[in-house]
Amino acid sequence: MSPLCYVLSVVTVVFAVGCVALRRKGKAFEGMMCKFMASFGFISVAVVGYCMSPHNTYYFCLVCFALMFGFFGDVLLGIKEVAPTFRGKLIPLGTLYFLVGHIFTLSAFISIGGFNLTALIIGIIGIPLAAVMMSIFKMKADTKLKMIMSVYYGALIYKVAASAVLLYSQKSPAFLLAFIGSCLFLISDTCLGFLYFTPIKRKNIWVTVELSTYYPAQILLAMSVALM
């Protein structure tokens, strides 16, 4: 992997840490700007990694689309922090952007590891499971948003299962990173669900865990391109 990818990864981590620190201090706008820069950083890792050592173009394109949709989702959810009036519209829209990103990531994994019925079944089971968990924890969201979130978490669970299948079939360091990144993404978005839809206390801790797992997840996915 190109040394430049390591440099970009470090720069991305610096902006991500800045985002966490600023959000904890209540500086929403500054934190949002750091978040945008960090999001741009993980896209750069994938692009530079591919340009330095061109390989599977199809996998690269799918991952890049996934990362770009994640970037746009970050923009929408970042705006929510400085314009809470639009929270009700921005959260579902941001969630949909991330969902499309996960679909692209799934397509990338399947393009290498092949379709696996067991992984799909696990993802489908994840949809009603997510709905049940939202009811148990009494998450405050309307019916439409709960449906979107259920499908979203089902896709996340499918993504983890598909990355596990990919790692098992290929046994490559690149796909080990992809698997770890997928697991971290599930942890991150679980925290995000509690942050957005439950009256939890000590939100700073949840924000820290959410962002501290989200950015490594995206960086690891980008590095899976660079390591192929």
Image (spheres, grey):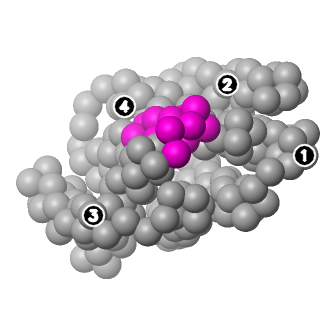
For the residues marked 4 and 1, what is the alpha-carbon distance in whole angstroms? 36 Å
Residue 86, image x and y in percent? 53, 64
Q: Residue furthest left?
A: 136
* Amino acid identity at mark 1: Cys
The residues bearing labels 4 and 3 have C-alpha atoms spaced at a distance of: 32 Å
Q: Nearer the viewer, residue 79 or 44?
A: 44
User: What whole-number distance in Å separates the C-alpha atoms at marks 2 and 3?
Assistant: 35 Å
Mark before the other along the chain sequence, 3 or 1: 1
- Of the image marks 4 and 1, the number of the one nearer the N terminus: 1
| Position of the N terminus by quadrant | top right
Residue on which the image places disc 4: 206
C-alpha separation, residue under disc 2 versus residue under disc 4? 18 Å
Vertical comparison of 197 with 124: above or below: above
4 vs 1, front mark: 1
The mark that comes first in sequence, 4 or 3, is 3
Stretch in magenta:
170-185
Amino acid on which disc 3 is placed: Thr
The kind of residue tagged 2 is Val
Q: Secondary structure at mark 1?
A: helix
Residue carrying label 2: 13
Note whether residue 200 is visible: yes
Of badges 2 and 4, nearer the viewer stands 2
Q: Residue shown at 68%/59% (left/top)?
A: 59
- Residue ID at (73%, 64%): 58
Pointer 1: what residue?
51
Crowdedness near tag 1: few (<14), some (14–19) or many (≥20) residues, C-alpha within 10 Å = few
